Image (spheres, rainbow, N blue to C red):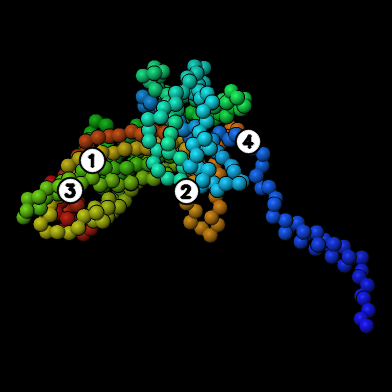
């Protein structure tokens, strides 16, 4: 007959804890959802000079009993129908009530697309456009719940680009390295530069002619030193030549000519830059990303940007000479 072994006090306590942990871990009816609370989501980027500013206002949803993919297909899960949305010029105190419009279709996908309200500040309706270098406040109030969601941002000023093209000299040329020089706009934090090349191609045998648009993203996330009057960086000429060689095939019968060059400079304030940086795809082992929002009592983004174009630039003959002689592009048959 086996004798029962007497347990020590410590063993008794440990045994009790194991039973308790087992009971808790086996319970599967824990409610992981908190009490329902309206969460307003705002996405708006103010761009000075535009005759119409568009801001998306919606809400987040939570449903512990139904799949999120199912709930997302119900418009009432996403949109608010009782809120008042206003934009205020903090400098003047003038308040503008934004008007929801439903004339922009939403692409089909996971979320409901039967209605797509966009809140609009329209110069034809409000007699007003966003000014550069002014602080603005967006506010969303729900008169039923009394909730207030808001954010502030300062609009950007315009930049003055002096290279690679000059306003009064629309000829584009590059040396071994070509400079990107601009006087930053007020409240700017970073800039992207893009070049659109319109290139004519023709076959010397068939006489067929086509025109192709090639975009070169020659500058990305160029951070501005705050307070500086000029921002300068240099881009290797090789990058431009490699772009051409990657787009066009060598064909002795195909000849080409650069018809025109258009430049566009995109600028963003720090709030916009931070949002984009945080939401870039994770490429490391750790995939979890920090969430960014500058909305008080809600979620989303309220920021500012600028978009400035310089049209109808033409290539310098010296640039065409480089294209015709460089090993990367000499067989692409570019002509003056």
Q: Which residue lies under the disc numbered 3?
A: 320
What kind of element bears circle 2?
loop
Label 1 vs 3, first from the N-terminus: 1
Label 3 vs 4, first from the N-terminus: 4
Q: At 61% across and 46% down in the image, what residue appears?
A: 64
Compared to 1, does 311 lie above or below? above
- In this rendering, does residue 71 appear at all? yes
Q: Position of 75 compared to 20: left or right?
A: left
Q: Nearer the viewer, mark 3 or mark 4?
A: 4
Q: Which residue lies under the disc numbered 1?
A: 261
Q: Position of residue 27 (x, y in %)?
A: 72, 56
- In this rendering, does residue 229 appear at all? no
* Label 3 neighbour load within 10 Å: few <14, some 14-19, many 20+: some
* Label 4 neighbour load within 10 Å: few <14, some 14-19, many 20+: few
Q: Which residue lies under the disc numbered 2?
A: 280
Label 1 vs 2, first from the N-terminus: 1
In this view, the residue in front, 200 or 184, is: 200
What kind of element bears circle 3?
helix
Label 1 vs 4, first from the N-terminus: 4
Distance from disc 1 to disc 2, alpha carbons, whole Å, reads 30 Å
**Circles 2 and 4 in contact, beta carbons < 8 Å:** no
The numbered disc on residue 37 is 4
Based on the displayed image, in which of its 4 quarters is residue 114 positioned? top left
Distance from disc 2 to disc 4, alpha carbons, whole Å, reads 29 Å
Label 2 vs 3, first from the N-terminus: 2
């Amino acid at each position: 007959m086996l004798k029962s072994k007497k347990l020590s006090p410590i063993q008794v306590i440990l045994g009790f804890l194991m039973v308790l942990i087992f009971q808790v871990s086996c319970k599967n009816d824990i409610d992981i959802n908190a009490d329902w609370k309206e969460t307003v989501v705002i996405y708006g980027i103010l761009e000075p000079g535009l005759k119409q500013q568009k801001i998306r206002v919606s809400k987040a949803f939570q449903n512990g009993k139904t799949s999120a993919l199912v709930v997302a297909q119900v418009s009432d899960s996403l949109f608010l129908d009782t809120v008042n949305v206003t934009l205020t010029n903090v400098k003047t105190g003038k308040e503008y009530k934004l008007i929801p419009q439903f004339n922009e279709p939403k692409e089909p996908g996971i979320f409901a697309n039967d209605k797509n309200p966009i809140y609009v500040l329209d110069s034809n309706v409000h007699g007003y456009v966003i000014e550069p270098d002014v602080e603005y406040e967006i506010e969303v109030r729900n008169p039923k719940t009394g909730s207030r969601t808001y954010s502030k941002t300062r609009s950007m000023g315009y930049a003055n680009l002096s290279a690679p093209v000059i306003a009064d000299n629309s000829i584009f040329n590059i040396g071994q390295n070509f400079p990107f020089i601009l006087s930053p706009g007020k409240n700017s934090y970073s800039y992207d530069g893009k070049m659109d090349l319109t290139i004519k191609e023709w076959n010397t045998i068939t006489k067929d002619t086509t025109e192709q648009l090639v975009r070169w993203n020659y500058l990305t996330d160029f951070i501005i030193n705050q307070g500086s009057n000029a921002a300068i960086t240099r881009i290797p000429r090789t990058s431009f030549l490699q772009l051409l060689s990657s787009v066009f095939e060598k064909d002795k019968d195909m000849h080409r000519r650069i018809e025109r060059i258009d430049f566009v400079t995109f600028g963003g304030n720090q709030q916009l830059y931070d949002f984009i940086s945080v939401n870039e795809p994770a490429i490391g082992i750790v995939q979890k990303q920090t969430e960014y929002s500058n909305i008080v009592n809600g979620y989303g983004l309220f920021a500012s940007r600028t978009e400035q174009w310089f049209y109808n630039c033409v290539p310098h003959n010296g640039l065409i000479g480089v294209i015709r002689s460089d090993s990367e592009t000499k067989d692409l048959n570019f002509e003056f």
